[in-house]
Image (cartoon, rainbow, N blue to C red):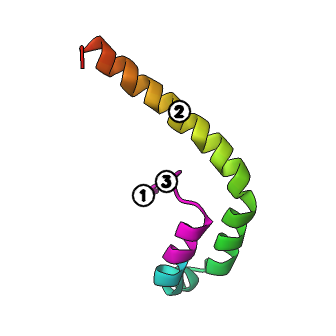
Amino acid sequence: MVQFHPEAGADTVAAWAAGDGGLLSSAGGDPAGAVASVREAEPELRAVWGAVSDAWGEVVRAHAHARGI
């Protein structure tokens, strides 16, 4: 199973790596590399996922408006 967290920035990924880094390493992953990768891409990630979040907000508002909420 894959679970995505578009809200997670580099600081969140660093906290996850601190807590679960051993498990990731034992599976062949690179916790420090993951954090560095997210930190480097964070401006683009914020732009892309911010747009997704804004669009989702519009869907929710339209649904609420249609229901008279």
Q: Quadrant of residue 1?
A: bottom left
- Please report the bounds of the magenta region as a residue range: 1-16
Residue type beneath disc 2: Asp
Secondary-structure class at tag 2: helix
- Return the mark for residue 54: 2
Q: Are marks 1 and 2 in contact (CB under 8 Å)?
A: no
Q: Residue 17 appears at what percent x and percent y?
A: 54, 78
- Return the mark for residue 4: 3
Residue type beneath disc 3: Phe
Crowding at mark 3 (Cα within 10 Å: few <14, some 14-19, many 20+):
few
- Residue picked out by circle 1: 1
Q: Could you give the CA–CA distance between mark 3 and mark 1, rounded to whole angstroms?
A: 10 Å
Mark 1 or mark 2: which comes first in sequence? 1
Give me the residue at 30% from left, 21% from top: 64
Give me the residue at 53% from left, 51% from top: 6
Task: Work out which quarter of the rendered image holds the C terminus and state it.
Answer: top left
Q: How many marks?
A: 3
